[in-house]
Image: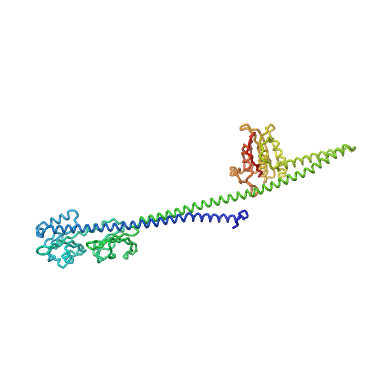
Amino acid sequence: MKDNKNNQTPVEKESFYKYLLKKFTFLTVICSFVPLLLAGWGLAIYYTHFARTRITHNFSDQVDNHRRFIEQFLMEQSSKLRLIAYANTKDFLLAPDNLQSIFENINRDSGTITDIGLISSRGNHLAYIGPYDLMEKNYLDTPWFKEVMQKGIYISDMFTGFRNEPHFVIAVARPDTDGKWILRATVNTDVFRTLVENVKIGETGEVYLVNREGVFQTSSRFSGRIMEKSAADISDFNGTAVDILADATDETSDKYIVGRSWLSHPEWLLVIRQKYDEAFSEINHATEMNLIFLHISALTILIVTIFITRYMVKIIRTRDREAESLNSQLLQAGKLASIGELAAGVAHEINNPIAIIMTERQILLDQYENTNINDEEFAKQFMVSMDQISVQANRCKRITHNLLRFSRRTKSIIETVDLNSFLMEIIELMERDARTGGIRFTAALDEKLPKIKSDISQLQQVFLNLINNAIDAHNDRAIGSISITTRKETAPSGVSVSIADSGCGINERDMANIFDPFYSTKPAGKGTGLGLSICHTIVRNLGGNITVQSVYGKGTEFRVFLPFDIAPLDHEADNLN
């Protein structure tokens, strides 16, 4: 890639702009994406860790609180039974209706006790209140009977017993004079299960109890029923444990958040578990939204970056083109300056031969007057030739005078200007070139046009540009005409100069831009786009205005208004065409 864009070919320049577009886009995207991604992912990781930790802690608290609630329930039922056993004698409880009354009072609020019985130390029922026929049953060899006789109070695991359905009992042994007797109560399994499962854990959650052997003490929603073997992890630990585990019995191998906590009495393991996706759905949703936001932000940055970089490259391309046009214009101005200096030199050199010719003519005339010539035809022809020499020499002198005048660079000087005479000089200068192209000048100058005060050098540039443009408008035509008109204006006060041509005209879409810098309607390489812009600036600085009317295909008329008096800014006259 060349460093100097002015030496590059159009293909190399276009490649350079594409390179700039890619480079700007890449750098902007990197500078925008990296902080966005770092901040986004950092916040997402921090929030996910924080939220998961908080949910895990909340889950642990829920397990711990529910364990205490179940323990409180069992302790309350045990305390009630112990109070009844120690507050009443065996004889009182054996009296008709007393045990029935106690049973009704216990179940008055919640119905948590299915039946209640008074059992002797030999395992026989002494009294029984309940829906089952158990009076003839002996419990001497049952595990719970042996445990309560040893420990004094005992809560059994789930068993079927004589009633052939899962249940557990709370039993209290009280010493007596003739040995121990037992007050036993069966906890309502449905009520207890409802109490255990009274936890809001969504659609996939479940709560259950298992004993040391892993046998369900309450039914699970998805894992098994009471008295079935559970796949729960039975291990010793203190407090409450919360883990993320995969269920081996689940064919989908979904992960679960599992909370476990051992009850103090009886030794049952409370298990609360829920599918990981549901438990952390809010976090997952927040993460998804964060990712969506990141992607939308990244896409927005990318789109904005592309638009901005395209706009920047477009500006650079436009600036480069303007710089190239300006360099070309400056080069052309230098050429024109050189041509002007050459023209001034040629005009100066031509003046010397013309002066000699005029001197020789005068010598010939003097000699003619001192010589007696009898041939009248020769004398007549001689005088005609002398007159023709005078006319042509004066014409050459006038042309060289105009060349010297128009090639001279001057500062902005306000002076009195006779517009009619000034325009005739310009017409005379431009007429020969126009005539070779089949263009005819016509002038309709107001004879009473007053003189104005303006900058003649800048007016020269304006009218030369307008007339040159009028000539160029006939390039595709064999003949044409340029009409120059002057007249006095009263509102506002000043004079107007109209330069109308019969050329190609200006397209409507170009009319709004013809006074813009570097905007040209001429073919590529034929114009710089600065002429009309400079004319517009000069006329405005001189206190006037310039307007245009055109019919495409028929011709164009430029109208220049100039005030009678103006005090423009002191600046160098712009000689660019």
Of 188 and 46, nearer the camera is 46
Of 11 and 415, nearer the camera is 415
Picture coordinates of residue 21, whole percent (x, y): 54, 54
Left or right: residue 98 compared with residue 499? left
- Figure quadrant of residue 468: top right
Left or right: residue 192 compared with residue 307? left
Disc tally is 0
- Figure quadrant of residue 95: bottom left
Picture coordinates of residue 150, whole percent (x, y): 16, 65
Which image quarter is the C terminus in? Answer: top right
Residue 178 can be seen in this image: yes
Which image quarter is the N terminus in? Answer: bottom right
Picture coordinates of residue 438, whole percent (x, y): 71, 43
Question: How was this image coloured?
Answer: rainbow
Decide: is 279 above or below 386. below
* Residue at the (29%, 55%) spot, across then down: 200
Decide: is 393 above or below 220. above
Left or right: residue 311 compared with residue 331? left
Picture coordinates of residue 377, whole percent (x, y): 87, 38
Of 400 and 341, nearer the camera is 341
* Residue at the (21%, 57%) spot, across then down: 73
- Figure quadrant of residue 538: top right
Point out the residue furthest to the bottom here.
141
Decide: is 274 above or below 424. below
Residue 194 can be seen in this image: no
